[in-house]
Every structure is written in structure tokens, then in C-alpha cells.
Image (cartoon, rainbow, N blue to C red):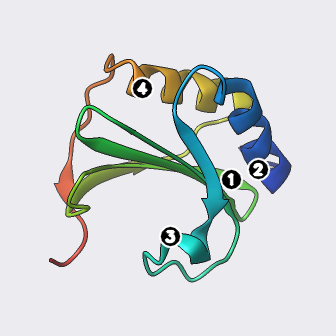
Amino acid sequence: MFGITVNDVIGVYEQLKDRYELVLTTTSALDEGFTIDCPILVGKANGRIIELYEDGGMFIMDVMDAEQTMGTHWHPFDVKNAVDDIVEFMEGKAHYEMRPFKLV
């Protein structure tokens, strides 16, 4: 699980950018209250948002509703798992246990 780098986030984006509408930006550009500034991959589909970034040598993946008040979070093990998770998200094939996580 450890050993993931920002280059892996960029690699996931490179694998999927021609198949789906994904944006590679930075956490500071999103202005969502991140305490780190790093590359982040963002996708939107089916009224939800997915974000993938690296912190502490791990992938961090968040899925949230469009209002960003409900969501879930996990750590894909490697690039293949991250790619698979994003494909499932973008194609509407995944089910998520969403919980409140941000103040309105």
C-alpha cells in the first residue's frame, strides 16, 4: 500500500484521460480545505464526484455527492486498483456507502 507517489496519480490520469472526462489539477486549486498541496484527479458522473490523490505514500480516493456533504473514502492498493475504481465510478457500476462528512 505504501510507496505510491504523485507520479502514480498522474499515471492513472494518463491511462484514463482519453476515455472519461477527468481533470488533473491540484488540491490548492480545488479550494476544498486540503492541508496539503498535491496533484489530484477529479471526475464527475451520475451526480457524484470522485477524487484521487496521494498522501503519505498511499492513494486516497474520495467519492462524494455533488453538494460535497455525503461521501466515502478508501485507499486503492495500487495503480491497477485505482484505475479499476475510477472506471467503475465513471460507468456507474459501483455502489457506495455514503456518510455525512463535511459541514454545510
Q: Distance between the residues labelled 4 and 1?
A: 22 Å
Q: What element carries label 4?
A: helix
Q: Can residue 78 be seen in this view?
A: no
Q: Where is residue 47 in the image (x, y as percent from the top left)?
A: 23, 40
Q: Nearer the viewer, mark 3 or mark 1?
A: 3
- Residue in view at x 76 percent, y 50 percent: 2
Q: Which residue corresponds to mark 4?
A: 90
Q: Where is residue 71 in the image (x, y as percent from the top left)?
A: 27, 53
Q: What element carries label 3?
A: helix
Q: What element carries label 2?
A: loop
User: Which three-letter amino acid code belongs to the residue tagged 1?
Assistant: Met
Q: Which residue corresponds to mark 2?
A: 2
Q: Position of residue 1 (x, y in %)?
A: 71, 43
User: Which three-letter amino acid code belongs to the residue tagged 4?
Assistant: Met
Q: Distance between the residues labelled 4 and 2?
A: 26 Å
**Which disc number belongs to residue 30?**
3
Q: Nearer the viewer, mark 4 or mark 2?
A: 4
Which of pointers 2 and 3 lies earlier in the amino acid sequence? 2
Q: Distance between the residues labelled 3 and 1?
A: 20 Å
- Residue in view at x 59 percent, y 19 percent: 19
User: Which three-letter amino acid code belongs to the residue tagged 3?
Assistant: Leu
Which of pointers 2 and 1 lies earlier in the amino acid sequence? 2
Q: Nearer the viewer, mark 4 or mark 1?
A: 4
- Residue in view at x 24 percent, y 66 percent: 101
**Which disc number belongs to residue 58?**
1
